[in-house]
Amino acid sequence: MRTYLRAQSLWEVVENGSNPAPLPDNPTMAQIRFHNDEVAKEGRALAIIQAAVHDDVFIKILNLDTAKEAWDKLKEEFQGSERTRRMKVLNLRREFDAIKMKEAETVKEFADRLSKVVTQIRLLGEELSDHELWRKY
């Protein structure tokens, strides 16, 4: 979803909240259009987030007013608190460091297993350097 929001130029609204500057006195038509576009981004981002979740989750974010609030609620719901997230990342990094190709395993099976761990780490907001990844392959 993050990629889609970025492609729609809406990720900044989700990540930082929407704070369009007020219109100046006697605004031009271009300034009015730009301001209206900035204000509309909040609603579009919130609608995308709400449309992307299952009905059970939608109920939890239905009454939230901003895309940032909805995103933060989803993060807390699925990633847990910051402490929980850090613990998950720590455990996944340990799993990443310990992962080795099994004797009867194909290269594809190993790559799939490794990719799953890397994806889980990245979904929690952590990055792995290219060097870390290449040393596993």
Image: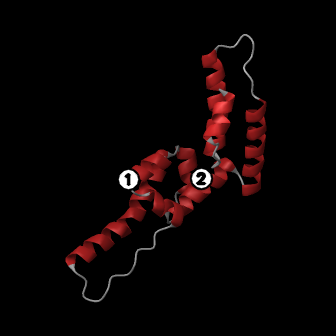
Left or right, residue 27 beside residue 109: left
Identify residue for label 1: 8
Amino acid, disc 2: Leu
What kind of element bears circle 2? helix
For mark 2, what is the residue? 74
Q: Amino acid at mark 1?
A: Gln
Please tell me in which quadrant of the rendered image residue 109 appears: top right
62 in relation to 18, above or below: above
Using the image as rendered, state which of residue 83 and residue 106 is in the foreground.
Answer: 106
Q: Secondary structure at mark 1?
A: loop
Question: Is residue 64 at all visible to an observer of this figure?
Answer: no
Horizontal side of 90 relative to 63 (left or right) equals right
Residue extending farthest to the left is 29
Q: Position of residue 136 (x, y in %)?
A: 68, 29
Above or below 110: residue 104: above
Q: Is residue 135 above or below residue 66?
A: above
Q: Residue at x 53, y 61 (%)?
A: 15
Residue 41 vertical position relative to residue 99 in the rendered view, above or below: below
